[in-house]
Image: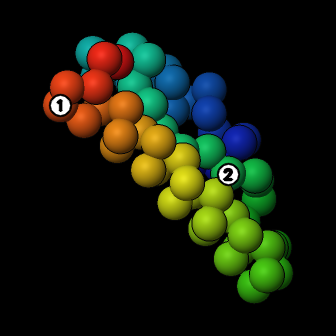
């Protein structure tokens, strides 16, 4: 998710019965980002996704 659409994503989570659903967020926009900026943002998404997955892992108090 890009930062400009976080509110919409949170509302969608609520509407789908998953309030507080975790998702990764990167800086908006991506359409005008350089290759270097996209690579940096991709790294950030990987870090955030890892945190989300580990937080949801069995045996991990969430």
Q: Secondary structure at mark 1?
A: loop
Position in image of residue 28 (x %, y %): 76, 53
Q: Secondary structure at mark 2?
A: loop
**Residue to which mark 2 is pinned:** 26
The count of marks equals 2
Along the line of sight, which residue is nearer the eye, 58 or 4? 58
Position in image of residue 6 (x %, y %): 62, 33
**25 w.r.t. 46: above or below:** above
In this rendering, would 55 be left or right of 47?
left
**Residue to which mark 1 is pinned:** 58
Q: How is the image coloured?
A: rainbow
In this rendering, would 17 be left or right of 30?
left
Residue at the far front: name it.
Answer: 59
Looking at the rendered image, the quarter that the C terminus falls into is top left
Q: In front of the other: label 2 or label 1?
A: 1
Position in image of residue 40 (x %, y %): 73, 70
Along the line of sight, which residue is nearer the eye, 22 or 12? 22
């Amino acid at each position: 998710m890009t930062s400009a659409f976080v509110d919409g994503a949170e509302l969608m989570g609520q509407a789908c019965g998953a309030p507080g659903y975790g998702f990764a967020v990167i800086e908006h926009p991506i359409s005008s980002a350089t290759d270097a900026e996209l690579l940096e943002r991709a790294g950030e998404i990987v870090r955030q996704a890892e945190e989300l997955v580990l937080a949801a892992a069995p045996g991990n108090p969430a």
